[in-house]
Amino acid sequence: MIGGRAQDAIDEGNRAHQLDPLSPIIAAQQAQAYTYDRQYDKAIELFKRVIADNPNFGRAHSELAYAYWGAHKYPEAIQEWKTGSQLEGDKNYMDWTAALDAGFRSGGWPDALRKALAVSLAQRNSKAEYISPYGIAALYAALGDKEHAFEWLNTAYQEHDISTIQLRTDFAMDSLRSDPRYTELVRKIGLPQ
């Protein structure tokens, strides 16, 4: 997630899987390493294996959804997020995925992101549960709205949101990489340059 050592992470994931081939969390982490290295087809293949062996493992569905998003397979991503949210039983997550699905059906991926963003902002404003500012920034970045993306990334930094560690590898942030504010934020967080 941090970046710069993708092959090391993949090698460690493979080693861990050899030591405990039945562990669903190890297998999911192994697949996640491929997602962050943008080897989406390999990640999808591994996540599907984890899910075949552990169909009720919600986290694997949610992480598979992220790999599908990276591969621009949006209907598959939405379906996996819906399944993951139901298995995890998280109402906020279910509301978010319902908005994503409704947006996609009415206007494609950009509308899906906008509706999911509206739900995320409403949930954050309700203060009933912690909603990651990094997640909100990722939606803005994916929509190409740099100003709001950086505003929320700065909030994530100030709140010590653990998700900021993936800033260098997160494909949702690609639209920000050429901006000097991105380089400065990477430096402030302390991520490898």
Image (cartoon, rainbow, N blue to C red):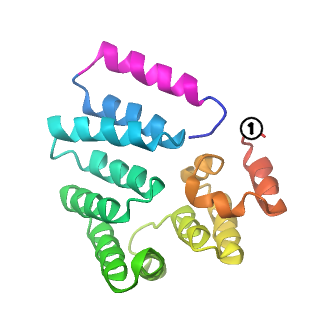
Residue 103 in picture, x, y percent from top left: 37, 81
Residue 88 in picture, x, y percent from top left: 23, 56
- Mark 1, other Cα within 10 Å: few <14 / some 14–19 / many ≥20: few
**Predominant SS along the magenta part:** helix
Q: Residue at x 34, y 49 (%)?
A: 64
Where 188 sits versus 43, above or below?
below
Residue pointed to by mark 1 = 192
* Quarter of the image that includes the N terminus: top right
* Quarter of the image that includes the C terminus: top right
Q: Residue at x 32, y 14 (%)?
A: 18
Q: In which quadrant of the rendered view does residue 120 lie? A: bottom left
Judging depth in this view, the residue of 142 and 62 nearest the camera is 142
Residue 101 in picture, x, y percent from top left: 31, 75
Residue 157 in picture, x, y percent from top left: 67, 58
Q: Is residue 190 magenta?
A: no
Where 8 sits versus 143, above or below?
above
Q: Relative to residue 78, is residue 39 drawn left or right?
A: right
Q: Which residues are magenta?
A: 6-21
